[in-house]
Image (tube, coloured by chain):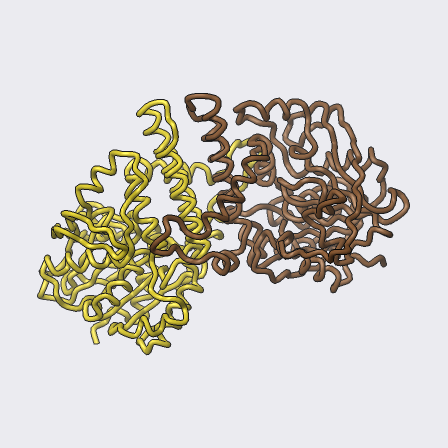
Chain colours: A brown, B yellow
Amino acid sequence: MSLALPPDHILPQPRALLGRVAELPLELGDTLQDVTLRGFAYGPPLGSAPVFVLAGGITADALPLGDGRRPGWWQALEATGLLQLDRHTVLAPGTLGNVSDWPALCALDRTDAVDLPRLTPFDLAAATEAWLMQIGCPQGVTWIGASVGGLVGLALALQRPDRISRLITISAGHQPDGWGTGVRHLQRELVRDALRAPWPDALQRHAGVATAMKRARQLGLLSYRGRDELSARFGRLTPTSAVPPIASYLEHNGEKFANHFSPQRFLLLSEAIDRFYIADPAALPAALAPLRCRVTVVGVPADLLFPLALQQELNDALEAAGVATQLLVLRSHFGHDAFLADQVALAELLLEHGILLED
Amino acid sequence: MSLALPPDHILPQPRALLGRVAELPLELGDTLQDVTLRGFAYGPPLGSAPVFVLAGGITADALPLGDGRRPGWWQALEATGLLQLDRHTVLAPGTLGNVSDWPALCALDRTDAVDLPRLTPFDLAAATEAWLMQIGCPQGVTWIGASVGGLVGLALALQRPDRISRLITISAGHQPDGWGTGVRHLQRELVRDALRAPWPDALQRHAGVATAMKRARQLGLLSYRGRDELSARFGRLTPTSAVPPIASYLEHNGEKFANHFSPQRFLLLSEAIDRFYIADPAALPAALAPLRCRVTVVGVPADLLFPLALQQELNDALEAAGVATQLLVLRSHFGHDAFLADQVALAELLLEHGILLED
């Protein structure tokens, strides 16, 4: 993270806001029972100020602006003054299948199950909509979503066109591409292999699954980060070393992830990305025509996972649909992770283009 | 492979040519004992025609123009008339650590060892040089090398500048980059994890290692193939399918590889790529100045593993070194594997530029 907060910066206090859905029917036919919807709010009470929703990656918590003591994963959006918590209410819905969950999923966390309900970003959007209604936010919001958070914003704007008055989608798109789907499929296979393997005992099973989660995360990191960044940060494999310098970066970040994230939740949400489908390319403009929001599509040329070409396709389809849209290019060597690793530059790009000004 | 041979095409007959080295000292300090050098020749006897050497990837056999009954992995270079076997002698040296091996490596194939000698492309070049001398080819050759075969050609031209009169290096470069090194490191970690894991018995160990080799190969495929190719060939994950369409492609190719390739040989040669080092960028022109050959650098814009930028860097450094060089761009959506999957286009590009004409 390139974010350095001034020492006198006062972090905002989040307020936990809960919701509950007794039955949540899913796009592909399953039904979730007894879903607890979690999320947080920052700034003025709901109903007293314009509302901004922040949504990030599948493994993100729902504290993008921190917990009041430590900064969050999108702190720069507030620290740069893009969001102003004296006059903007900021909401962070917990992703369904990660932060927002249900008893059957919690039970799965303790098993080796690989057969899971089929979630899509439309389901994540429906859960967010239920949460927004239950916490008392019926009005149109500005949605700032990166990665799966961008997919969910687009899904929600299609499900309920008056819900989102302004949509900013970053490093997302209208679909994943073949390479990204292949990479995520392989990540899932690594985890499934370990869940299914004939480990001699429970302890070794636990260690084996953790190793697989670590490797899956490492493959993720190689798709999240920019290749020029990796070349610049990590030198070559020297004659005296057994592993290349990138190994310790991959090891550290892989371990951290494996120690705190559930294999089942990872499988569920990784697959949800690959199940995002609006329409085939030719039918896409017609499918997007119901949108009532203005859209800003942000793409990063070094993004390997949701490449700039996908952002251009989305922007073109929106234009063809008659939606007010613009494509902004964030020139960052951090690749897909630029929305985190270069978040000051992202905030400045949005500020520079006056994206969040009321009008 | 996009190669369709005419039905009356007569495949050339290869001739096996063996060599042996009692002691092969390696660049990084180890010494190999009793190395058997294997390779094949096609066309006129050595000494009666100009000699062309073909060298490909780390897992390739030494039969690029086939075994006389089935076509080989680079058949188009002959089928298109780029190489003419009535007046060109074609040699295919077996890669050290794969086709050319030594008793201690064969013994390792039956173990779970992960500690292996450290090979570099300079060692592969030294083994090739020994083979060329022993089979009676002391003269300068035209080297056509793709992927690691390109690295080895460059290494050999530096070791013995009069050995190579013309060097064509395809999808290779003067070094791997950080992303490629990260991908290969992760491939090796997947295999090492399985070699070290506490499997309950030998049968399950065998299956576990084969699964790891399959996953490593699948990660390789995602770096070998072009992303537009993958998007075009494989559709999206449909609501009714459990895995995306790319899964069966990855499964088929991964299994095939896991069933015939030794984990130790894979670790050895994958690492050899990451151990390729000529000089730091500033010192590279001086390090390349001893070259006496003309060079053609071929790059593919869609190559994810040895990207076009690396080919441009090599070409620039060669120019700065005063070496006669040219950069040719092969526009293929097949990525790194274009030298195989688009080999007719490669042959036509070389024909069009008169690369192999005597002068």
Residue A186: x percent and y percent? 47, 39
User: Residue B13's x, y, as percent?
Assistant: 14, 51
The residue closer to the viewer here, B145 or A214, is: A214
Q: Is residue B86 above or below residue A291?
A: below
Q: Is residue B8 visible?
A: no
Occupied quadrant, residue B197: top left
At which x and y percent is residue B80?
A: 26, 60
Q: Name the residue at 30% across, 34% down.
A: B112
Residue A315 left/right relative to B137: right
Assign the C terminus of chain A to one quadrant of the image: bottom right
Query: Dividing the picture into quarters, in which one does residue B260 lie?
Result: top left
When the figure is inspected, residue A344 is found, relative to residue A164, above or below; the finding is below
- Residue sitting at the far front: A7
Q: Where is residue B96 in the image (x, y as percent from the top left)?
A: 23, 51
A55 relative to B184 in the view: left or right: right
Residue displayed at 48% across by 22% down = A202
In front: B240, or B299? B299
How many numbered discs, if any?
0
